[in-house]
Image (spheres, grey):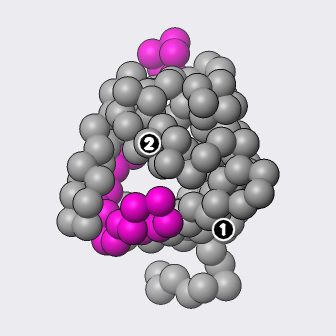
Amino acid sequence: MEKTDHNVITVETIVHAPIEKVWKIWNDPKHIVQWCNASDDWHAPYADNDLQTGGKFKTTMAAKDGSMSFDFEGIYTHVEPHKLITYELGDGRKVAITFAAELEGTRIVETFDPEQTNPAEMQRGGWQAILDHFKKHAEANV
């Protein structure tokens, strides 16, 4: 199924921290394993990140009870430090993340192609929950 711009999903937040710090925490595997989960019964036991155009990333997301896990992985298609990250997931979906310095901190906006299995609102909720965990982690580590 061909994807069009009207079916993308967007989530966003403002992190009360300088953009340089936000960028580092977003991209450092030591931090990724601490914030990349949608709920407290999940965690990210593994993360690897080659942050450059053409570089690959992989984060293992797993239920803490061991009942389920999956690898979230893809290839970076464009990286502009402190501004923009775009990547393509293994299934061809595209993601764009912008970082913008504002008076109150750093605005992060993630736009992504939805997958076709789960409802859009469920996907938006999951991605927003992960972004909210990032915000909490980043603000605690400024």
Q: Residue at x 78, y 51 (%)?
A: 104
Where is residue 85 shown, x and y percent of the image? 43, 64
Nearer to me, 14 or 8: 14
Please say if 73 is above or below 138: below
Tell me what residue is drawn at x 66 percent, y 53 percent.
106
Q: Is residue 82 left or right of residue 98?
A: left
Which amino acid type is shown beneath numbered disc 2?
A: Lys
Q: Is residue 93 visible?
A: no
Q: Residues within 10 Å of mark 1 (few under 14, many from 20)?
A: some
- Do the CB atoms of the residues marked 2 and 1 lie less than 8 Å apart? no
Q: Nearer the viewer, mark 2 or mark 1?
A: 2
Q: Which residues are magenta?
A: 63-86
* Amino acid at dot 1: Ile
Q: Look at 39% across and 22% down and name the residue there.
A: 45
Q: Which mark is residue 24?
A: 2
| Residue 86 image position (x, y, % from top left) | 42, 68
In screen coordinates, is 90 left or right of 69?
left
Q: Which mark is residue 9?
A: 1
Secondary structure under the numbered disc 2 in the rendered image? helix
Q: Residues within 10 Å of mark 2 (few under 14, many from 20)?
A: some
Q: Residue 118: horizontal and vertical position, in percent?
A: 63, 55
Q: Quadrant of residue 6?
A: bottom right
Report the side of 30 relative to 39 (left or right).
left
Q: In terms of secondary structure, where does tag 1 sit?
A: strand
Give how far apart the Cα atoms at labels 2 and 1 are: 25 Å
The residue most toward the top is 65
Screen quadrant of the C terminus: top right
Q: Residue furthest left?
A: 54
